[in-house]
Image (cartoon, helix red, strand yellow):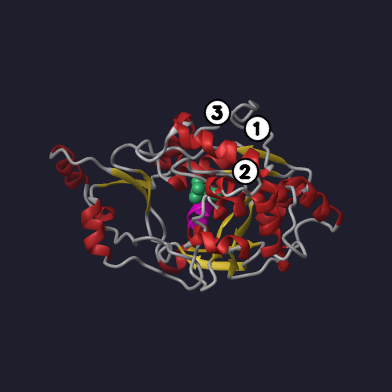
Amino acid sequence: MTSASAAAARPVVGRLAPSPTGLLHLGNAWSFLMAWLDARTRGGTIILRHEDIDPARSRPEWREGIERDLRWLGIDWDEGPGMEGSRSPYLQSERGAVYESALEKLSGLGLVYPCFCTRRELRMLAGAPHGAADGLGDCGAPYPGTCRRLSDAEREERARSGRHAALRLLCPDGEDGRMTFSDRLAGEVSCTLSECGGDFPLRRSDGVWSYQLAVCADDIAMGVTSVVRGEDILFSTPRQLRLYRLLGGTPPEYAHLPLLCDGEGKRHGGLSLQALRERGFTGADVIGSLACAARRAPDDSPLTPAALAEKLRTGGGIPWSRIPRGKITVPERFLPLCS
Ligand code: GLU
């Protein structure tokens, strides 16, 4: 059985994984709606997990705002804050033990090494932001492997000089690190880990866990079978698949959604749901407009997520092959508010 069919054979568990670093925007509403519909149209479970690992950027008031906006949209969850279940806790800031044990496993495989490079050094080495393989989004700055080759003595010397180390995962170079997976929208995606940035951090030098490690360890621990998220994260997926392989988890099915863009094709998901509410729009206005933009409704009449799920269920689920590819234009009625 391939990993995709293994994931498909399990009862569907999806997740909403917001980062509570600001107000929810239209782009988030689009991804969460599709993640929610995917689970709901297949009789699955939905988990709400706040990705608040970075204490400098996350705030409890953003978390509360996200939950309020989701309820306003009509998007609910079966497990999450206020809906305790077997997968708790639901805040990444409270899940350090899960990440610690994943790190231990990776270290036991001899694949983790300390990296003493400062962000500034990495920026200077890396130059301009890197685009890497076509169509995969922005992979961030590629790591040149500086600390991979340090001897034990050099590592000790750097540690003694008071430099704090980040921890990186050793990844195979070139073709040895080719990762191929099937995306429900993009089809077959194939790229090397080097193209995705090379050895990536598991923990920052200030002790903050990396997004890649946290998201993967959590998705495994929570038994997530379906990941629906924006195309801008596509570049992370090969790295996460490497973690799945090393940690021994079954990868989920993936759907990376086109991003919301303005009339000129520039990415635009920044319009906050709060701003729309203040303009008098309802959650059903937003859902109806998004469904129409994604060509899942003939017009932008108000629609609840539950009504949309029902409609899709009777038609056999989300028709992934008919979701527009590349980009989705922000619903017309919201465009004037985008500038
Ligand atoms: N927390 C991430 C974000 O808000 C989403 C991560 C994911 O879906 O894997 O961008």
* Residue placed furthest toward the right: 314
Side (left or right) of 132 relative to 223: left
The numbered mark, 2 or 1, whose residue comes first in the sequence reads: 2
Q: Quadrant of the N terminus?
A: bottom right
Residue drawn at x 46%, y 69% as measured from the top left: 175
> Can you identify the residue that label 1 sits on?
79
Q: Secondary structure at mark 3?
A: loop
Q: Position of residue 212 (x, y in %)?
A: 46, 48
Q: CA distance from mark 2 to mark 3?
A: 14 Å
Q: Amino acid at mark 3?
A: Pro
Q: Which mark is residue 89?
A: 3
Q: Is residue 110 visible?
A: yes
Q: Quadrant of residue 106?
A: top left
Residue at the image point whose x is 55% and y is 28% from the top: 89
Highlighted magenta segment, given as a residue range: 236-243
Q: Is residue 264 magenta?
A: no
Task: Provide the residue designation for mark 2.
Answer: 15
Q: Residue 166: image x %, image y %?
A: 30, 44
Q: Secondary structure at mark 2?
A: strand
Residue at 80% over, 55% down: 312
Marks 3 and 1, how far apart in space?
Answer: 10 Å
Q: Could you say whether the residue bearing mark 1 is in a helix, strand or loop? A: loop
Task: Tell me which numbered mark, 2 or 3, is placed earlier along the sequence.
Answer: 2
